[in-house]
Image (cartoon, grey):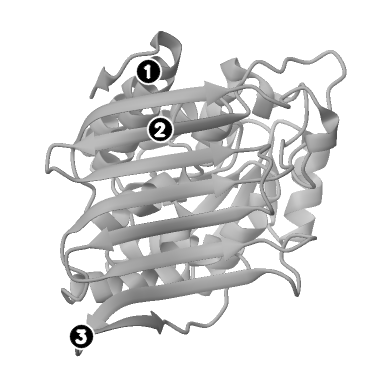
Amino acid sequence: MSTKIAIIGAGGMAGYHASGFRQAGAEIVALCDVNQAAADRAAAKHQIGRVFTDVTAMLKAVPELDAVSIIVPNKFHAPLALQALKAGKHVFCEKPPALSAKEMAVMKTTAEKAKKTLMFNFNNRARPESYAMMDYIAAGTVGTINTCQAKWIRRAGIPGFGGWFTTKALSGGGPLIDLLHMIDLGLHFMGYPEPAHILARTYHDHIDNKAFKGPWGIPDVEKGTTDVEAAAHGFITFKTGQSMNFAVSWAEMNQREEVSVTFQGAKAGGLVRRLFGVNGIDATAQDDCQLYTLEHGRQVNRDIVVTPDETMGRARSALNFIRTLEGTEKPLNTPAQALALMKIIDGAYKSAATGKPVAL
């Protein structure tokens, strides 16, 4: 019997979730969004039969649901996940996991108590490059990864002005919490070591300059709020002795948008990177997946060739959720990892606010 799932949220990510769920053989039985018109449009586009505008009503009307996916502004991730878990449903939630580590801790405890699966769409773990690199790491080719650099830098990528992305009460912050994917991917490669301390700074250059608006996100809200950072840079130490530095930005004066993790292992170094093109994913875009080794006394750069995935793992991540429920794959992420990540994000904001290192 196929897994029955409902999608909460009619935004653009719904298409990736729907694609992955269906590839795994799941049945999407309902879609819910507070905006009736948006819900109707998304349901028609993705061929989903039942439409709701209230989650409580949906859970009551469709008791056969096994799981829900959550695609809403960040503020509502935790409340909706908790509601679904308490109703006995598995949960697949968009990033970030929550607004804070405190919220994430409650989600983790609730999932454990309900004996339900709680996973998050850290889709960059599901990119073919990441799967390939993890094969080398698991095989011992890389050895212990001592240091790592995580970067998501946009040249002009502010996702609208005055909307929920730029309203801290709704988003939790700017690019630090929005573009946390590469920090997560670096931690994934490193074995998710327990963080010890963090030193971070946030910057607000260009956050009110509409010349730095990106081609995605939401329409500007004329009288809305823009009270988040434009960029964040920091350094994390771990109790294992490992370390990571990170740079995330919506508006940085660099050549072009870069999404990358570079690491240095005891046996080999590595790189997973996407350089976006002039118009996003176009002919000028470039994907790299490389190992850097020493062979026969010579420096060797080894290209790892994989099948390109323009969705950056989004559909594959959703597919993994269904296969996890069905016991045919291991989960790509866990609540414990999500909690560790949110402790790092919280610590970075606290360090930036105080100007001091923060113990985690």
Q: Secondary structure at mark 2?
A: strand
For image coordinates 25% across by 43% down, the residue present is 243
Tell me if mark 2 has few (under 14), some (14-19) or many (20+) residues whose alpha carbon lies within 10 angstroms of its own: some
Distance (Cα) linking label 2 and label 3: 35 Å
List the residue tagged with mark 1.
351
List the residue tagged with mark 2.
234
Q: Nearer the viewer's eye, disc 2 or disc 3? A: 3
Residue 231 on image: x %, y %? 58, 31
Horizontal side of residue 254 vs 211, given as left or right? left
Distance (Cα) linking label 1 and label 2: 9 Å
The amino acid on which the numbered mark 2 sits, given as a three-letter code, is Gly
Res. 65 in view:
no
Q: Secondary structure at mark 1?
A: helix
Q: Nearer the viewer's eye, disc 1 or disc 3? A: 3
- Tell me if label 2 and label 3 are in contact, CB under 8 Å: no
Q: Tell me the number on the disc at residue 8.
A: none
- Tell me if label 1 and label 2 are in contact, CB under 8 Å: yes
